[in-house]
Amino acid sequence: QKEVEQNSGPLSVPEGAIASLNCTYSDRGSQSFFWYRQYSGKSPELIMFIYSNGDKEDGRFTAQLNKASQYVSLLIRDSQPSDSATYLCAVNIGNGGATNKLIFGTGTLLAVQP
Amino acid sequence: ETGVTQSPTHLIKTRGQQVTLRCSSQSGHNTVSWYQQALGQGPQFIFQYYREEENGRGNFPPRFSGLQFPNYSSELNVNALELDDSALYLCASSFLGNEKLFFGSGTQLSVL
């Protein structure tokens, strides 16, 4: 069973702090990793994707990937109350391009306190 | 706003009934996927369609079926509804070979 695991939280951080969200995955052959943000009652929104080991930065967001440890993380700098949401980690276990089959974790609820 | 539209927004059915959910893909996208998200869970992959054919399926029984039309819109059909089918059903579109999925706003299905 190919799985993606996340701490369900809630993770509570003060406004302006760095929020660190973590995810592990079981399929060692996975190549593509995604972070989605989901506000309560809304659909998931893609915020970051990463394919290579190391860090990828986009504005206040940094995704980190360590394939040897099967570990993906998302850092949110200068956290804002508007960042309060559930963050879903997803891994594509599809067949290399023809099929996108994302396996999602259960998500981590982030609460940014003003 | 992703450009992926789903209808209806909410739906209430009784056990044993059949339901059809609809999705219009984002302009330029030729692949559509369907996901089921139960309360407190992450989305689960149901299947993907490309060129009007299913080209990937998750662990869902055959009573979950789909269609994709020449204009890339899609339907999800669920027969013999069960209480556990109550969930948010999400449609996502993409371009074949591009792994970034863009989700619609979903259909909330309640089975009583």
Image (cartoon, coloured by chain):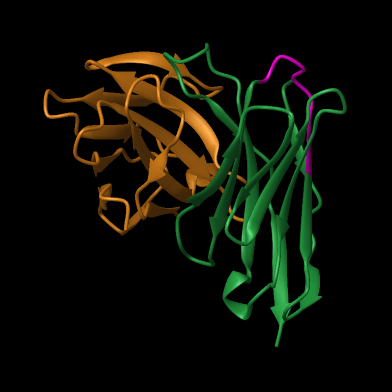
Q: Quadrant of residue B55?
A: top left
Point out the residue furthest to the right here.
Answer: A69
Q: Position of residue B6 (x, y in %)?
A: 27, 49
Q: Residue at x 24, y 24 (%)?
A: B67
Q: Nearer the viewer, residue A106 or B12?
A: A106
| Location of residue A11 in the rendering, given as x and y in whole percent from the top left corner | 80, 66
Q: Is residue A29 magenta?
A: yes
Q: Quadrant of the N terminus of chain B?
A: bottom left
SS assignment for the magenta stretch, majority: loop
Tell me if B40 is positioned left or right of B30 in this view.
right
Let me know if residue A56 appears in the view. Answer: yes
Q: Quadrant of residue A49?
A: top right
Magenta stretch, residue numbers? A23-30
What is chain B's hue in the picture?
Answer: orange
In the shown orientation, is residue A91 left or right of residue B69? right
Residue at x 48%, y 65% (from the top left corner): A41
Q: Is residue B56 above or below residue B107?
A: above
Q: Outermost residue, bottom direction?
A: A114
**Which residue in the rendered view is the most extreme toward the left?**
B70
Name the quarter where the C terminus of chain B is drawn. Answer: bottom left
Q: Is residue B73 left or right of residue A23?
A: left
**Chain letter matching colour green:** A
Residue B39 painted magenta: no
Residue A77 in the image, given as x and y percentages of width and height:
71, 65
Where does the image place residue A30, in percent across and percent down from the top left?
67, 20
Report whether residue B40 is seen: no
Q: How many marks?
A: 0
**Left or right: A69 as drawn, with respect to B86:** right
Task: Tell me which residue sits at (51%, 46%) in the image.
Answer: B83
